[in-house]
Image (spheres, grey):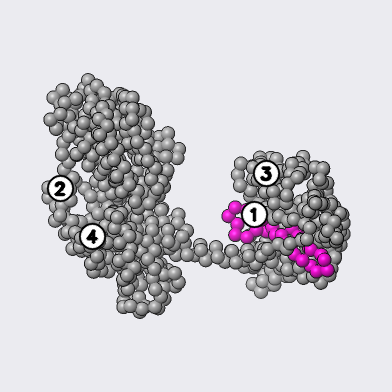
Amino acid sequence: MRTTTSSQRHDIAALRPPAGGGPGAVAARSGVPATAAGPVPGGARRISLPGDPRAAATAREFVRGALADWTAQELPGTEGLAGRLADEAVLLVSELVTNAVVHAGTAVELRCRLDPGADPEPDADPDGPDGADGRGRPGVVIEVSDHHPARPVRGREGASLSESGGLGLLLVGAVAESWGITYRRAVKTVWFRLAVAAPGGGGRPELEVSFDDQMLQRGLRAAELLAPAVRRTTPQRHSAADWINPGALSFLAEASDLLSGQLDADQVAALAAQLIVPRLADWCAVWLYDGSGGHGEAQRLAGVWHSCESRIDSLRTALEREPPVMAGRGAPVTGSANNGSAVSWPWPQEPSGYGPGGAALACPLVAGGRRFGMLMLGRAGLMWFPDEAVGLIEDLCRRVARAIATARAYRRQERISQVLQRRLLPRGRARVPGVESAVVYEPREGAWAGGDFWDLFEAGDGRWCFALGDVCGSGPEAAAVTGLARPVLRLLARDGFGVAEVLDRLNKTMAREAADSVAAVAAAVAAAGAGAEAPVEIRDEGEQARFLSLLYGEIVPYRGGSGGARCTLASAGHPLPLVLGTDGAVRVVAAPQMLLGVVEDATYVSESFDLLPGETLLCVTDGVTERRSGRRQFDDEDGLAGALAACTGLAADATADRIHRAVHAFGPTPPDDDLAMLVLQAAPRE
């Protein structure tokens, strides 16, 4: 656990953590020792809030309800919970919950409890009731926790007032008697304590934090929009370039970090709106094109955010009625819309959705010469956005557009991968009369298509053929071999060739394909001239091993309903198949032979056996047998046979599921190889 000590108010001589030793277990500053008091019975409430736009409103209602309930119960120390203390508690909770939702994006835990206080410290101001800082008086301690502890917290002691991050901790430091931040392994908690006012109203100085209206309208920098500062006696003017300051840059850096982690365009749009509100604007909306953003294409509203949560739905309704169109309706966007420049936009006249009038901007989302949508935002009370703020908004929109482009590219690649995977794998498995089947297929983590493949199909004349293969290699090159092997298998089987003949012909096909690849590399080198190398993509494809391990067989169910089937199979460099008998005994039913594609004139032989009623045939790839845990493999000391023996009496689906779970449980990390498994079980006699 890592704890960050809190900042003090200017009128506080020392910091005291909240009682109970929870998130407030922070060492007191200025040499004042931390003290703790026991919790008040019945004086603690807790609620979990989802990380959505309505979390802040729910938190405010929860805190007001808790304070009112404690006051009604007349618990010790609740005499002063109403009025100003309740308003301050609600204000601070609203800020902290909003920050947690925007920055952490996780669920929020809110805890509110009574603190009966303690005797004042010896160095407390004797002129103040119970000490000027209120440490001896009862109070309320509120804790806001999120589950993203790695996110830096803005506004610590010593930070400049222009640093980004919103009011957040600036308000907490100005209002709370004491506060702090606690970091745990998976939780970050911000806590604060508000002391009950002393009899007579002493001991609670007024805050002097406000906006300077003249500065806001005439010379406001982007940094002030991001983090409003305390009032200055003389408004200051700044140059147009002065907005590039640590506050603005840290905001853009944080925005880039958050946006880059999103691989869905709609999530990017929603996150962009939440980043802008309330830092730069009171409301924000993002429209996206689902296509190329060309002539006449309609936009759709992908994200809406408002600083007042209750106005989000009405804002969305109003915007959907009349979406913005730049450069004329249905016309191609030109000029500033193409280079991503923001333009002033009329303030929408929808009081229920937008609030009071102000300044609005519309900025196209353009990246790489393509238009992805548009972002609109508005801030109440402004005549116009200062140039410095407009520059910041345009920079942010460029980052949003690039994040959307990345998300779209990822989705396109994912769709291509899914289509190819569907083509590389069978659309379903055939139903074999009197034989139950189960299949497990799992590409290694992060792979779009694996080198493992399976098949189970009807070959005609009462025969059903099955195959389980593993291409040497990975990635698209291995998938290309899979795309060659599976159709050839089906074609040869349906032409009436037996198991051994199918392997002979497939072996010749793969060996010749490998020779053609080597010849292509040699031709590319010759064309480039002496001493040159072939292009990288051709060389990599040619050097990719075209070997294939394959378990292939056919199964012919017995006629007459007696149960069982006749199996004929052959294993070419593949893990050997196992049969589980009804008595729990496991036996190997094939002999090892050479990989396919190594030697063109190699010949293969098949073996036949009876799969009796209730017996189970298990075929796996080396992703199962070679699954590692340290130096051990899953099949060491006949581990696979032992796992299969433990499945005695289970159906085909249950057997496949049990072995699959055993393989995953064998190692502490996900498997680093493709995994495929085929289970065939002869139906038991009734």
Residue 200 horizontal/vertical position (percent): 12, 30
Mark 3 highlights which residue? 662
Name the kind of residue labelled 2 in the image: Arg
Spatial distance from mark 1 to mark 4, Cα to Cα?
53 Å
- Horizontal side of 227 relative to 562 (left or right) equals left
- Horizontal side of 671 relative to 567 (left or right) equals left
Spatial distance from mark 3 to mark 4, Cα to Cα?
59 Å
Mark 4 highlights which residue? 355
Mark 1 highlights which residue? 442
Mark 2 highlights which residue? 232
Name the kind of residue labelled 4 in the image: Gly
**How busy is the neighbourhood of tag 1: few (under 14 within 10 Å), some, or many (20 plus)?**
some
- Mark sitting earlier along the chain (3/1): 1
Residue at far top of view? 122
Looking at the image, do the residues carrying marks 3 and 4 touch, with CB atoms under 8 Å apart?
A: no
* Front: mark 2 or 4: 4
Name the kind of residue labelled 1 in the image: Glu
Tell me the SS state at disc 1. strand
Tell me the SS state at disc 4. loop
Residue positioned 42% across, 43% down in the render:
147
Q: In this view of the protein, which residue sits in the foreground, 237 or 292?
A: 292
Dominant secondary structure (helix, strand or loop) of the stretch shown in magenta: strand
- Mark sitting earlier along the chain (1/2): 2
- Mark sitting earlier along the chain (3/4): 4
